[in-house]
Amino acid sequence: MKKWLPVVAAMLLSACSSSEEDKTYYQLPSATQSYAANQTAQDNRLLWVEQVSVPDYLAGNGVVYQTTDVQYVIANSNLWASPLDQQLRNTLVANLSSALPGWVVSSQPLGATQDTLNVNVTGFHGRYDGHVIVSGEWLLNHRGTLTKRPFHVELTQQEDGYDAMVKQLAAAWQQEAQSIARELTRLP
């Protein structure tokens, strides 16, 4: 019996360590950077993406999936590689920079003449019917004038699984960035 003890101990240890290996981490892809990296603020419109906030249920490490019309599951093994609010802010800056040539878009303050954008994301999850949801509202301060817009983007997932869900969430977030960019180009 004693000769099996090391084998059982080794199996238990390997089972414990494999749970750590079963975790998958996700990072949102951003738009291809097509803007000039050395832009100067003197010749461009300035936009500071001050904050992208998420509610508590989205602020944790786990990717969120809606299982019924009233129930959400936060994954234990499918996790965000970095905090979701940071990923959303970074990809929004990259997507807006790509969509707004002639603008300097930054996650840092740019000066007294900057426009300021704040986004409150209330939904960023997959859903039981094969759709992904990206929703919330954004608030723009342009020369002291406030513009507030709600948004709701719903896209159909083309494949099953978390990889496909995260890619569609990124596509929906990029679609909303394009919508924000269109609004910004209309400003005087």
Image (cartoon, rainbow, N blue to C red):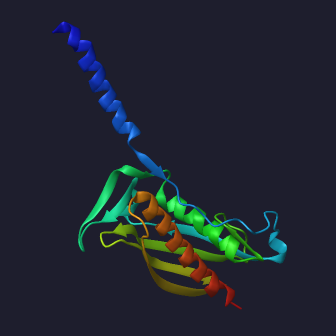
* Between 108 and 62, the one nearer to me in the picture: 62
* Quadrant including the C terminus: bottom right
Q: Residue at x 61, y 87 (%)?
A: 183
Location of residue 164 (image quadrant)? bottom left
Q: Does residue 144 appear in this view?
A: no
Query: In the picture shown, does residue 60 fall above or below 119?
Result: above
* Between 9 and 61, the one nearer to me in the picture: 9
Report x, y in % for residue 28: 53, 60
Location of residue 75 (image quadrant)? bottom left
Instruction: Give the total number of marks visible in the rendering.
Output: 0
Report x, y in % for residue 17: 36, 31
Q: Residue at x 19, y 8 (%)?
A: 2
Q: Residue at x 45, y 72 (%)?
A: 121
* Between 43 and 38, the one nearer to me in the picture: 38
Q: Is residue 19 left or right of residue 168?
A: left
Q: Is residue 5 left or right of residue 175?
A: left
